[in-house]
Amino acid sequence: MKTLFEEIKASIKNNYNQDRSFWRPVLPWGGVFTIKAGRKAVSCTPLYVEIRLKNTCTIDGFLMLLYVILNENDNFPRELSLHFGREFVDCFLYLMDTYSFTTVKLLWIWDKMEKQQYKSEVHKASLVIDLFGNEHDNFTKNLENLMSTIQESYCSNWRCPTRVQEDQQRTISIKCGGLREFSQRVFCHGAPPFVVLNMQHWKSEDLAYVPYYLDLSDHKYLLEGATLFNKEEHHYSAAFQIDGHWMHYDGLRNVNLILLNKPPEFLLLSSLVYIRATEK
């Protein structure tokens, strides 16, 4: 049985100009998970028999990109298991490959998100989980441990009370009566398999002008994908490449995975995703 990734690659290889879309929906917007309640459910308060997901585009694009990344390099599942947990990675890949898309979203929500990151309420017999908001709050915020960096700074004033300091923030503001010299910023846990850059407010057609590779901590990172934002619909989608071909994923559309011959128009860049190049 082919994996979803193998199916997508096969569709790229066998595509025709008149049919540039994948044959079935992938990670459709929202989702409904039916609970098979037993006798004990009668005593539960409140009682609900299904879970409904709303506004899932704030995690959908990154889940699609995460799936592609995990399949791009044989070592990435093992490396990401150190950050996400082996059980999570194995379960995530299994659910994606079995087209259990609502369940894979619940896996991310309950395993990686904090309760305050989303709204939930019981409506009649349904538990409704609403992910409306910003994808950086709902997804990339939960990757801080993976992409955390550290930087040392040295003040030229010998009397400075904090002459040598380590900092994990992007900027450092210290008044020490001297000049402060910064060392190269390095990753706290070694070079991660991928990094996410916040690129909000760039137009998607500017994708041709962004760097296709980055040099970070003595490692080379290659552009793998991007998440895009439709300001009018307040909706996120994603673009990624497989075997040199760019594809656009939009869970809100009936045909939600298509081959691109140019960047989608009228969308803003939200994030750029780079994967670490394979060492030769």
Image (spheres, rainbow, N blue to C red):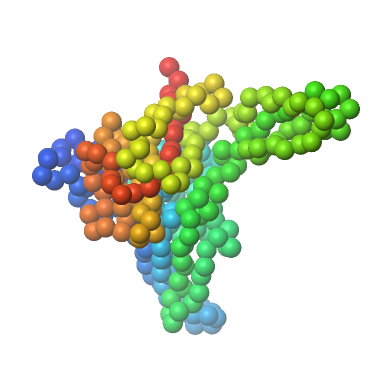
Point 55% across, 81% down: residue: 45
Q: Position of residue 28 (x, y in %)?
A: 32, 58
Q: Position of residue 81 (x, y in %)?
A: 52, 40
Q: Which residue lies furthest to the right in this view?
A: 159
Quarter residue 242 falls in? top left
Point 48% across, 56% down: residue: 134
Q: In which quarter of the image is the N terminus?
A: top left
Q: In this view, does 215 lie to the left or right of 61?
A: right
When the figure is inspected, residue 15 is found, relative to residue 132, above or below; the finding is above
Q: Residue furthest top?
A: 280
Point 41% across, 66% down: residue: 54
Q: Is residue 194 left or right of residue 83?
A: left
Q: Where is residue 62 in the image (x, y as percent from the top left)?
A: 42, 47
Q: Which of 138 and 211 is in front in this view?
A: 211
Point 53% across, 33% down: residue: 192
When the figure is inspected, residue 130 is found, relative to residue 243, above or below; the finding is below
Q: Residue furthest front?
A: 177
Q: Position of residue 20 (x, y in %)?
A: 17, 44
Residue 1 shows up from this direction: no
Residue 11 shows up from this direction: yes
Quarter residue 272 falls in? top left
